[in-house]
Amino acid sequence: MKLQVINKIKKRIKYYFRKNKQISLVFLCNRPAVWGSLKTVLESCVKDNHFNVTFIAMPSKKQLPEIVFNHDIYESEGAENFFKNLPCKVINGYDYERKTWFDIKKLKPNYIFYQRPYNATIPPQYNSKVTSSYAKILYVPYFTNFIGGCVFESCYNHDFFRHTYQIFIDSIYSKKELDRWFSTLRKKPETIVTGYPKYDNIDKLKDIDSDNWNFPKTKNVKRVIWTPRWCTDEGNCHFFDYKDKLLDFVEKSNDIDFIFRPHPQAFLEWNATGELPEVEAEKYKEKYNILPNAKIDTQKEYLTTFYSSDIMISDMSSVVAEYFLTGKPIIYCHKKDCFNDFSRALSEGFYWVHNWEELEKTINMLKCGNDPLKEKRQEIIEREFYLPKQGAGFTIKELIKRDFYG
């Protein structure tokens, strides 16, 4: 960010303070499925009369075969409907008929929270380089920092973050990695450990059931949720290895209630790469419609499903860390080592499998109630997770006030 831009923002903040103005805060979001990373931040700010909060619901560029994001076709993920009842002013950022975008600058924002940090998927006027000329860019990762290597780097691309003011993160692990990754930037974002808003109010979920399952909860049926990684070029996605075998197994198992929760980008990605074209994907989805004890989960919220389940099958998916806090067993389908320090520590509490025979054997073991790693997982939770008493959302809200008022 240029020095004159920083000075301009500082002058405006001092002016607002003298005039007893509220902090103008904007949330820019397109994906309901990952709203948990910002939910308690917004709720905390709305309750504080120092803030004037505006929420902008928007679509993003659809991933298309061959041309990927090199186009101007925007597709909604249901943000306009999902967020319309938030306790603040909600604006639809895109007019689908006129194909025009709302001018964020009209709100005179002091701060803008981006839900996802990808300039390639949004219009030029929403680019972080543009918006940082009149507001401070804030960010809370929409995923847990669980995967190392190139995955980490692509999720924190310099193109967006060279214009970011502050990043609020979950742990000291993340801070060390981010500070190292941003060390080459001339203007570095400030990284602050606040805990993760997705973990706020976790205790309230422990006894809540979900109507997302195929059957009511019984002792004789185990609820299994499957969350494979969506991107295959990293070498750690097991979806294509087990997708048919798992369905065959579930079909023969009347003591299993099975939910497949794909990443919102999964079927789009597999269609774009040609690994699972739309026609084949529809045939695969139809198999779930036929089975009485299997379902593809398309709901926006997933934590109640997590907490009311019995077992998770996954790989290097960032939701594994969120599931870990449930205390439930995790079957980890290993293909390639992409751990960072945090996920490697958690992996001590996983049941590792390398092929279908091991996966089937482990599911059958856990179905019978044999869970030898249960105490180990609880020990890891107490050791590895930072859960501030007042919540990460409240902590972040207070940091913004401190920054604004000096």
Image: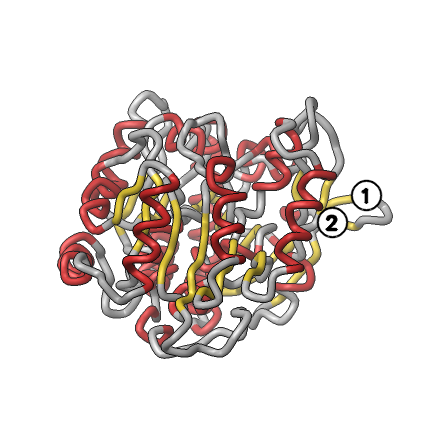
| Position in image of residue 128 (x %, y %) | 54, 36
Residue 283 lies in quadrant: top right
The amino acid sitting under disc 2 is Tyr
* Residue on which disc 2 sits: 94
The amino acid sitting under disc 1 is Lys
Q: Secondary structure at mark 1?
A: loop
Q: Residues within 10 Å of mark 1 (few under 14, many from 20)?
A: few
| Position in image of residue 105 (x %, y %) | 63, 46
* Above/below status of 393 relative to 64: below
Q: Nearer the viewer, residue 289 or 172?
A: 289
* Residue on which disc 1 sits: 99
Whether residue 166 can be seen here? no
Looking at the image, residue 129 sits to the left or right of residue 95; the answer is: left
Whether residue 147 can be seen here? yes
Tag shown at residue 16: none
Looking at the image, residue 396 sits to the left or right of residue 380; the answer is: right
Inter-mark Cα distance, 2 to 1: 7 Å
| Position in image of residue 140 (x %, y %) | 41, 49
Chain-order first, disc 2 or disc 1: 2
